[in-house]
């Protein structure tokens, strides 16, 4: 935001006048209590310690120096026709009417913005509309954000929903900051989990006469039902792998044959199961409002990664000594702790000669950055996963940086915590462990129950339940800082009051209803003179801040700043709405207040979009 930069420049100019030299890392930020100004700085605290002066006294001297700085006229105010004098050349090109008051308080310096500033900021929001809040920090950059990453043959679990909400929001924040954004999804379509599912599918096919793709599922089940059956097969196979030695041996053999593509029957079931689960994933992505630009699969990455490891063995990687049971030799490993004591050793190719997740991750990352793969190579790759993968990814990234030092600062890994229910139960209404898809649909069902008595048709109720149910879940995830564990409370998450996604949506819908009502009586409103109350309310103090919040959210890749801001903004709006009769023949401020409502709705629309949340037409 320009006003913040202007204040920083005023402070720096004041320090020069006081002959205080040096690089001082002071901050200019919004105080927690808006009664203490619109911006506050700790510059006196920072400088006083270094020059041996009392912070309170120094703060007062800095305020005096700021007030003595001549302000150059802005463009259009004579700046071109009246060249500044020598004395004026040390001034700051800044409209002093934008700051109402500057005060020193307890060693801090507080800046109070003027009514003129807030009126102008409302005009700017209405002028920029859907562009309000955007910046050009990443102009010309190309950034890939990889997220969700479910595995075919397994259910979508709650962690995938968390990664999706975070990854989609970060994609939008990056896009809002001027970058060309590529949304990527990396899906594990090979591995032991696939073999576990196929083992059960081979023994218990949907159609007993055959196991061919045509016969499997020919009774007319939906994609979702078939995907659930495949997921259940995986769960059964996983349990058998841990408890039945014979099953374990068969599953290991199936896994080897999947890699080799050497068994026609296994290949047919594999092709069918992969297709069904990928189609089921797309249905979930559509509900979540995500559309990926690029899909990557482990099956495509394994040979690329394996060749990279072999090419760098010995060297970066090394072969371990075989055990007596290993006829083919030992595994190929990477001693990451050699390069960083915080890291550890990991296997990249196992003793059977099969590439591990780590190796496939190598292939994926280098494929992303491959020169010429896109019209312009990536400037940054962002990957979102659960926090338990943090150490694993650090090892992989260290190996990549040794092969390609230029990529070391172009890889960013973001992690999220775990979700648990407030009730302590992680099971669905059916009694089984709840999947991500079930949680999503349960959330929508609760909203549908909540609006069943509203005067909407059935199609409207269904649409509202989808939009609001998704918002309830996404907001519950995004309001917490990254790496924080989340306690999900169904009742609170779908409440139309308080700290929830539906509360933000409901307030935006309420604002829009005011605008619709005003539009119906537009002729009457046009007869009013534009009158503006001189009192500054918190709604005005918060509206213009979206740009700053977006910038901070990008710099820290942390969507929760936007969620927190929108909640504070909504509270300020509802306070304004509750204490103001806007549509009133006696209201002299109606035109400006309607602009305030328009600005609030636009800001909410832009901010919620950044969280991947839609505003329904009705609630």
Image (spheres, rainbow, N blue to C red):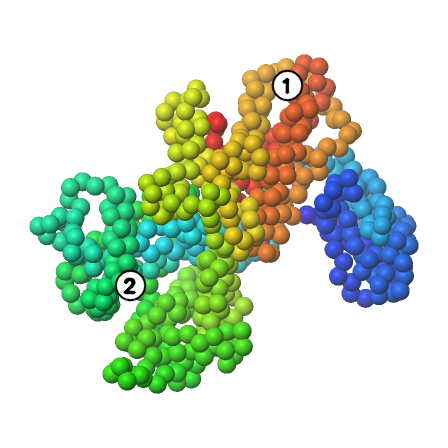
Nearer the camera: disc 1 or disc 2: 2
The residue depicted at 60 percent of the width and 39 percent of the height is 567
Which residue sits at x=51%, y=46%? 487
Q: Closest to the observer: 232 or 380?
A: 232
Q: Residues within 10 Å of mark 2 (few under 14, many from 20)?
A: few
- Measured from the top left, where is residue 152 in percent x and y? 30, 55
| Up/down of 128 relative to 367, above or below | above
Residue under label 2, please give it. 242
Image location of residue 197, percent across then percent down: 24, 57
Horizontal relation, residue 292 to residue 60: left or right: left
Q: Residue at x 84, y 63 (%)?
A: 49
C-alpha distance separating marks 1 and 2: 68 Å
Q: Is residue 36 left or right of residue 464?
A: right
Mark 1 falls on what kind of element?
loop
Which disc is residue 583 wearing?
Answer: 1
Q: Position of residue 534 (x, y in %)?
A: 78, 29
């Amino acid at each position: 935001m320009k006003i913040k930069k202007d204040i920083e420049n005023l402070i720096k100019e004041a320090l020069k006048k006081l002959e205080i030299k040096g690089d001082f890392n002071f901050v200019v930020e919004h105080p927690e209590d808006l009664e203490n100004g619109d911006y506050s700085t700790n510059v006196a605290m920072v400088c006083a310690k270094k020059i041996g002066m009392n912070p309170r006294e120094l703060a007062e001297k800095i305020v005096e120096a700021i007030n003595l700085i001549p302000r150059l006229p802005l463009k259009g105010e004579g700046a071109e026709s009246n060249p500044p004098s020598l004395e004026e050349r040390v001034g700051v090109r800044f409209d002093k009417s934008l700051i109402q008051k500057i005060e020193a308080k307890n060693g801090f310096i507080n800046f109070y913005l003027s009514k003129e500033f807030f009126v102008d900021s409302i005009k700017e929001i209405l002028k920029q509309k859907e562009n309000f809040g955007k910046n050009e920090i990443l102009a010309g950059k190309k950034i890939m954000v990889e997220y969700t990453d479910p595995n075919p043959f397994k259910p979508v679990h709650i962690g995938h929903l968390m990664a999706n909400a975070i990854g989609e929001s970060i994609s939008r924040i990056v896009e809002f900051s001027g970058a060309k954004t590529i949304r990527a999804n990396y899906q594990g379509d090979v591995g032991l989990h696939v073999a576990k599912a196929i083992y059960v599918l081979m023994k218990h096919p949907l159609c007993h006469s055959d196991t061919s793709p045509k016969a499997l599922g020919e009774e007319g089940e939906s994609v979702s039902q078939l995907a659930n059956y495949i997921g259940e097969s995986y769960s059964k196979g996983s349990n058998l792998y841990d408890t039945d030695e014979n099953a374990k041996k068969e599953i290991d053999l199936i896994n080897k044959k999947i890699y080799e593509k050497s068994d026609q029957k296994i290949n047919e079931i594999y092709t069918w199961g992969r297709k069904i689960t990928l189609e089921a994933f797309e249905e979930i992505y559509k509900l979540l409002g995500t559309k990926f630009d690029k899909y990557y699969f482990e099956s495509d990455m394994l040979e690329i990664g394996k060749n990279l490891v072999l090419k760098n063995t010995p060297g970066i990687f090394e072969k371990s000594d075989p055990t007596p049971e290993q006829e083919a030799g030992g595994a190929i490993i990477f001693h990451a702790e050699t390069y960083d004591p915080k890291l550890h050793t990991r296997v990249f190719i196992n003793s059977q000669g099969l590439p591990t997740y780590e190796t496939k991750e190598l292939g994926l990352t280098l494929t992303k950055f491959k020169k010429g793969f896109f019209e312009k190579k990536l400037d940054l790759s962002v990957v979102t996963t659960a926090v338990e993968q943090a150490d694993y990814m650090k090892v992989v990234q260290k190996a990549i940086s040794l092969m390609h030092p230029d990529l070391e600062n172009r890889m960013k890994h973001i992690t999220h915590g775990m979700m648990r229910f407030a009730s302590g139960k992680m099971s669905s209404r059916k009694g089984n462990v709840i999947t991500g898809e079930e949680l999503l649909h349960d959330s929508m069902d609760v909203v549908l129950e909540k609006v069943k008595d509203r005067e909407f048709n059935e199609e409207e109720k269904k649409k509202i339940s989808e939009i609001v149910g998704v918002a309830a879940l996404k907001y519950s995830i995004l309001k917490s800082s990254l790496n924080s564990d989340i306690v999900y409370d169904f009742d609170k998450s779908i409440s139309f009051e308080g700290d929830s996604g539906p509360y933000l949506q409901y307030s935006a819908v309420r604002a829009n209803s005011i605008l619709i009502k005003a539009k119906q009586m537009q002729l009457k409103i046009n007869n009013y003179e534009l009158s503006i109350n001189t009192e500054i309310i918190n709604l005005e103090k918060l509206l213009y801040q979206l740009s700053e919040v977006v910038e901070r959210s990008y710099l820290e890749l942390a969507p929760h700043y936007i969620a927190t801001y929108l909640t504070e903004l909504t509270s300020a709006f509802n306070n304004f709405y509750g204490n103001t009769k806007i549509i009133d023949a006696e209201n002299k401020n109606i035109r400006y207040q309607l602009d305030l409502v328009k600005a609030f709705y636009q800001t909410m629309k832009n901010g919620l979009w950044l969280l991947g949340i839609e505003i329904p037409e009705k609630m």
